[in-house]
Image: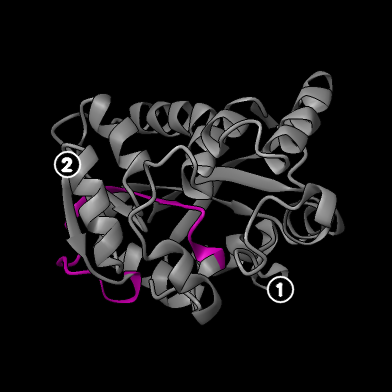
Amino acid sequence: MTPTDSASALFDQEGWWDPESFLHGLHTLLDPVRGPYVTTALEKAGVDSRSRVLDVGSGGGFLAATLSDAGYDVIGIDPSMASIREAKDHVRSTFVAAAGESLPFSDSSVDAVTCSEVLEHVEDPEVVVAEISRVLRPGGLLVFSMPNRTVLSRLVLIDLAQRFWPTRVLPSELHDWTRFIRPTEFRELAQRHRLVVGDVHGVAIRLRHLPAAVAALVALRTSQITYAEAGSRVHLRLSRPTSIAYIGVATRT
Protein backbone atom coordinates (compact mmCIF):
# COMPACT_ATOMS: atom_id res chain seq x y z
CA MET A 1 0.00 0.00 0.00
CA THR A 2 2.31 2.49 -1.41
CA PRO A 3 1.17 6.04 -0.57
CA THR A 4 0.88 8.61 -3.31
CA ASP A 5 3.94 10.83 -3.73
CA SER A 6 2.16 13.82 -2.19
CA ALA A 7 1.19 11.94 0.97
CA SER A 8 4.15 9.62 1.54
CA ALA A 9 6.33 12.11 3.44
CA LEU A 10 3.46 13.03 5.74
CA PHE A 11 3.08 9.46 7.00
CA ASP A 12 6.73 8.41 6.90
CA GLN A 13 7.67 9.98 10.23
CA GLU A 14 7.87 9.32 13.95
CA GLY A 15 5.44 11.96 15.22
CA TRP A 16 2.42 9.70 15.46
CA TRP A 17 2.22 9.79 19.25
CA ASP A 18 3.24 13.44 19.67
CA PRO A 19 0.20 15.47 20.90
CA GLU A 20 1.43 18.41 18.81
CA SER A 21 1.31 16.38 15.59
CA PHE A 22 -1.70 16.29 13.25
CA LEU A 23 -1.18 12.53 13.11
CA HIS A 24 -2.01 12.19 16.79
CA GLY A 25 -4.97 14.51 16.27
CA LEU A 26 -6.34 11.99 13.76
CA HIS A 27 -6.05 9.35 16.47
CA THR A 28 -8.01 11.31 19.08
CA LEU A 29 -10.53 12.31 16.42
CA LEU A 30 -11.21 8.90 14.88
CA ASP A 31 -10.60 6.25 17.51
CA PRO A 32 -13.49 7.06 19.90
CA VAL A 33 -15.90 6.06 17.12
CA ARG A 34 -13.69 3.74 15.05
CA GLY A 35 -12.33 1.60 17.90
CA PRO A 36 -15.70 0.49 19.34
CA TYR A 37 -17.11 -0.10 15.87
CA VAL A 38 -14.22 -2.34 14.84
CA THR A 39 -14.13 -4.40 18.03
CA THR A 40 -17.92 -4.84 18.00
CA ALA A 41 -17.83 -5.91 14.34
CA LEU A 42 -15.14 -8.49 15.08
CA GLU A 43 -17.07 -9.84 18.05
CA LYS A 44 -20.28 -10.16 16.00
CA ALA A 45 -18.35 -12.05 13.32
CA GLY A 46 -16.99 -14.50 15.88
CA VAL A 47 -13.40 -13.27 15.64
CA ASP A 48 -11.94 -14.10 19.05
CA SER A 49 -8.59 -13.52 20.75
CA ARG A 50 -7.14 -16.66 19.15
CA SER A 51 -7.76 -15.21 15.70
CA ARG A 52 -5.19 -13.37 13.60
CA VAL A 53 -6.18 -9.80 12.76
CA LEU A 54 -4.19 -7.94 10.11
CA ASP A 55 -4.18 -4.12 10.25
CA VAL A 56 -3.30 -2.92 6.75
CA GLY A 57 -1.81 0.57 6.79
CA SER A 58 -1.21 0.51 10.53
CA GLY A 59 0.78 3.77 10.63
CA GLY A 60 1.84 4.55 14.20
CA GLY A 61 -0.30 1.73 15.58
CA PHE A 62 -3.40 3.55 16.85
CA LEU A 63 -5.99 1.00 15.72
CA ALA A 64 -3.62 -1.86 16.50
CA ALA A 65 -3.38 -0.53 20.07
CA THR A 66 -7.17 -0.58 20.42
CA LEU A 67 -7.37 -4.12 19.08
CA SER A 68 -4.46 -5.30 21.21
CA ASP A 69 -6.08 -3.84 24.33
CA ALA A 70 -9.23 -5.79 23.40
CA GLY A 71 -7.21 -9.00 23.41
CA TYR A 72 -6.70 -9.62 19.71
CA ASP A 73 -3.54 -11.02 18.11
CA VAL A 74 -2.77 -8.09 15.81
CA ILE A 75 -0.21 -7.79 13.05
CA GLY A 76 0.29 -4.26 11.70
CA ILE A 77 1.48 -3.73 8.14
CA ASP A 78 2.90 -0.44 6.86
CA PRO A 79 5.49 0.48 4.21
CA SER A 80 7.03 3.23 6.37
CA MET A 81 9.91 2.11 8.57
CA ALA A 82 9.59 5.29 10.64
CA SER A 83 5.93 4.47 11.34
CA ILE A 84 6.81 0.87 12.17
CA ARG A 85 9.42 2.02 14.70
CA GLU A 86 6.91 4.42 16.24
CA ALA A 87 4.29 1.67 16.51
CA LYS A 88 6.72 -0.78 18.09
CA ASP A 89 7.68 1.82 20.69
CA HIS A 90 4.09 2.35 21.81
CA VAL A 91 2.06 -0.79 21.07
CA ARG A 92 2.55 -4.39 22.19
CA SER A 93 1.76 -6.02 18.85
CA THR A 94 3.69 -7.34 15.87
CA PHE A 95 4.51 -4.84 13.13
CA VAL A 96 5.94 -5.66 9.71
CA ALA A 97 7.26 -3.28 7.08
CA ALA A 98 5.42 -4.21 3.90
CA ALA A 99 3.16 -2.71 1.26
CA GLY A 100 -0.51 -3.52 0.96
CA GLU A 101 0.01 -4.30 -2.71
CA SER A 102 2.16 -7.30 -1.73
CA LEU A 103 1.19 -8.66 1.68
CA PRO A 104 3.76 -11.14 3.06
CA PHE A 105 1.18 -13.78 4.00
CA SER A 106 -0.08 -16.93 2.35
CA ASP A 107 -3.55 -17.30 0.87
CA SER A 108 -6.46 -17.50 3.35
CA SER A 109 -4.11 -17.16 6.33
CA VAL A 110 -5.77 -14.41 8.39
CA ASP A 111 -9.18 -14.32 10.10
CA ALA A 112 -9.88 -10.59 9.83
CA VAL A 113 -8.43 -7.47 8.23
CA THR A 114 -8.81 -3.82 9.15
CA CYS A 115 -8.11 -1.12 6.57
CA SER A 116 -8.95 2.30 7.94
CA GLU A 117 -8.29 5.64 6.24
CA VAL A 118 -5.86 3.98 3.84
CA LEU A 119 -7.32 3.37 0.38
CA GLU A 120 -7.69 7.09 -0.40
CA HIS A 121 -3.92 7.46 -0.01
CA VAL A 122 -2.67 4.66 -2.30
CA GLU A 123 -1.91 4.67 -6.01
CA ASP A 124 -4.09 1.66 -6.85
CA PRO A 125 -6.78 0.75 -4.26
CA GLU A 126 -7.90 -2.23 -6.33
CA VAL A 127 -4.55 -3.98 -5.96
CA VAL A 128 -4.66 -3.51 -2.18
CA VAL A 129 -8.21 -4.85 -1.96
CA ALA A 130 -7.23 -7.84 -4.10
CA GLU A 131 -4.37 -8.61 -1.72
CA ILE A 132 -6.63 -8.26 1.32
CA SER A 133 -9.06 -10.72 -0.24
CA ARG A 134 -6.26 -13.15 -1.05
CA VAL A 135 -4.92 -13.40 2.51
CA LEU A 136 -8.36 -13.35 4.16
CA ARG A 137 -9.85 -16.79 4.81
CA PRO A 138 -13.29 -17.60 3.38
CA GLY A 139 -15.84 -16.27 5.84
CA GLY A 140 -13.28 -13.83 7.22
CA LEU A 141 -14.14 -10.21 7.91
CA LEU A 142 -12.82 -6.94 6.48
CA VAL A 143 -13.55 -3.76 8.44
CA PHE A 144 -12.94 -0.63 6.36
CA SER A 145 -13.35 3.13 6.67
CA MET A 146 -12.63 6.04 4.35
CA PRO A 147 -13.91 9.46 3.24
CA ASN A 148 -16.68 9.67 0.65
CA ARG A 149 -16.32 11.63 -2.59
CA THR A 150 -19.10 14.21 -2.37
CA VAL A 151 -19.48 17.97 -2.51
CA LEU A 152 -19.81 18.05 1.27
CA SER A 153 -16.66 16.01 1.88
CA ARG A 154 -14.75 18.35 -0.42
CA LEU A 155 -16.05 21.36 1.50
CA VAL A 156 -15.23 19.92 4.94
CA LEU A 157 -12.09 17.82 4.40
CA ILE A 158 -10.43 19.78 1.61
CA ASP A 159 -11.63 23.38 1.53
CA LEU A 160 -12.10 24.01 5.25
CA ALA A 161 -9.49 21.64 6.72
CA GLN A 162 -6.70 22.01 4.15
CA ARG A 163 -7.18 25.22 2.11
CA PHE A 164 -9.19 27.99 3.77
CA TRP A 165 -6.64 29.95 5.83
CA PRO A 166 -8.78 30.73 8.95
CA THR A 167 -9.71 27.05 9.42
CA ARG A 168 -6.79 25.27 7.78
CA VAL A 169 -5.36 22.78 10.29
CA LEU A 170 -4.18 19.90 8.06
CA PRO A 171 -1.35 19.75 5.52
CA SER A 172 -2.57 20.81 2.08
CA GLU A 173 -1.28 17.60 0.50
CA LEU A 174 -2.89 15.23 3.02
CA HIS A 175 -6.00 14.44 0.98
CA ASP A 176 -6.66 14.44 -2.74
CA TRP A 177 -10.45 14.61 -3.14
CA THR A 178 -10.33 12.87 -6.51
CA ARG A 179 -8.99 9.74 -4.76
CA PHE A 180 -11.92 9.50 -2.35
CA ILE A 181 -14.08 6.42 -3.00
CA ARG A 182 -17.87 6.45 -2.97
CA PRO A 183 -19.64 3.59 -1.11
CA THR A 184 -21.16 2.28 -4.34
CA GLU A 185 -17.73 2.26 -5.97
CA PHE A 186 -16.19 0.42 -3.05
CA ARG A 187 -19.00 -2.11 -3.04
CA GLU A 188 -18.35 -2.88 -6.70
CA LEU A 189 -14.58 -2.98 -6.17
CA ALA A 190 -14.95 -5.37 -3.24
CA GLN A 191 -17.34 -7.62 -5.14
CA ARG A 192 -14.80 -8.04 -7.95
CA HIS A 193 -12.50 -9.59 -5.36
CA ARG A 194 -14.94 -11.93 -3.57
CA LEU A 195 -15.78 -9.51 -0.78
CA VAL A 196 -19.45 -8.91 -0.01
CA VAL A 197 -20.07 -5.56 1.69
CA GLY A 198 -22.53 -5.65 4.59
CA ASP A 199 -23.56 -2.83 6.91
CA VAL A 200 -22.17 0.61 6.13
CA HIS A 201 -22.53 3.60 8.46
CA GLY A 202 -21.67 7.24 8.00
CA VAL A 203 -19.23 9.02 10.30
CA ALA A 204 -20.31 12.55 11.20
CA ILE A 205 -20.58 15.21 13.92
CA ARG A 206 -23.74 15.70 15.96
CA LEU A 207 -25.26 19.11 15.30
CA ARG A 208 -25.19 19.94 19.00
CA HIS A 209 -21.43 19.30 19.01
CA LEU A 210 -20.75 21.46 15.93
CA PRO A 211 -20.11 24.73 17.83
CA ALA A 212 -17.57 22.99 20.06
CA ALA A 213 -15.89 21.47 17.01
CA VAL A 214 -15.57 24.86 15.31
CA ALA A 215 -14.25 26.39 18.54
CA ALA A 216 -11.68 23.58 18.75
CA LEU A 217 -10.48 24.28 15.20
CA VAL A 218 -10.12 27.98 15.96
CA ALA A 219 -8.21 27.23 19.17
CA LEU A 220 -5.96 24.83 17.29
CA ARG A 221 -5.39 27.31 14.47
CA THR A 222 -4.32 29.93 17.02
CA SER A 223 -2.06 27.45 18.89
CA GLN A 224 -4.14 27.48 22.07
CA ILE A 225 -4.52 23.69 22.15
CA THR A 226 -2.73 20.68 20.66
CA TYR A 227 -3.91 18.52 17.80
CA ALA A 228 -4.57 15.74 20.27
CA GLU A 229 -6.86 17.94 22.34
CA ALA A 230 -8.62 19.36 19.28
CA GLY A 231 -9.36 15.88 17.96
CA SER A 232 -10.90 14.84 21.25
CA ARG A 233 -13.29 17.82 21.20
CA VAL A 234 -14.92 17.06 17.85
CA HIS A 235 -17.03 14.05 18.98
CA LEU A 236 -17.63 12.03 15.85
CA ARG A 237 -20.47 9.50 15.79
CA LEU A 238 -21.99 6.85 13.55
CA SER A 239 -24.74 8.24 11.33
CA ARG A 240 -27.09 7.17 8.58
CA PRO A 241 -25.82 9.71 5.99
CA THR A 242 -22.43 8.78 4.52
CA SER A 243 -21.83 12.11 2.81
CA ILE A 244 -18.51 12.90 4.52
CA ALA A 245 -17.05 9.54 5.54
CA TYR A 246 -18.15 5.98 6.16
CA ILE A 247 -17.22 2.76 7.94
CA GLY A 248 -18.42 -0.76 7.27
CA VAL A 249 -17.75 -4.46 6.98
CA ALA A 250 -17.31 -6.98 4.17
CA THR A 251 -17.17 -10.78 4.26
CA ARG A 252 -14.88 -12.92 2.12
CA THR A 253 -16.92 -15.44 0.13
Q: Position of residue 39 (x, y in %)?
A: 38, 29
Q: Position of residue 58 (x, y in %)?
A: 34, 53
Identify the residue at horizontal 27%, vertical 76% (top origin). 102
The amino acid sitting under disc 1 is Thr
Task: Give the left or right position of residue 51, taking residue 161 as reference.
Answer: left
Q: Classify 10 Å Cα crowding around label 2: few (below 14), some (14-19), many (20 and above).
A: some
- Decide which of 194, 230 is in the foreground and name it: 230
- Residue 240 visible in image: no
The quarter of the picture where the C terminus appears is bottom left
Identify the residue at horizontal 78%, vertical 62% (top origin). 163
State which quadrant residue 172 falls in: bottom right
Above or below residue 230? Residue 4 is below
The amino acid sitting under disc 2 is Ser
Above or below residue 67? Residue 131 is below
Instruction: Point out which mark residue 155 bears.
Output: none
- 171 is within the stretch colored magenta: no
Above or below residue 34? Residue 130 is below
Task: Give the left or right position of residue 145, taking residue 216 as reference.
Answer: left
- First-in-chain label (2 vs 1): 2
**Residue that badge 1 annotates:** 178
Check the image and name the residue furthest to the top.
208
Residues under labels 2 and 1: Cα distance?
A: 34 Å
Range of residues picked out in magenta: 100-120
**Residue that badge 2 annotates:** 93
Q: Classify 10 Å Cα crowding around label 1: few (below 14), some (14-19), many (20 and above).
A: few
Report helix, strand or loop for mark 2. Answer: loop
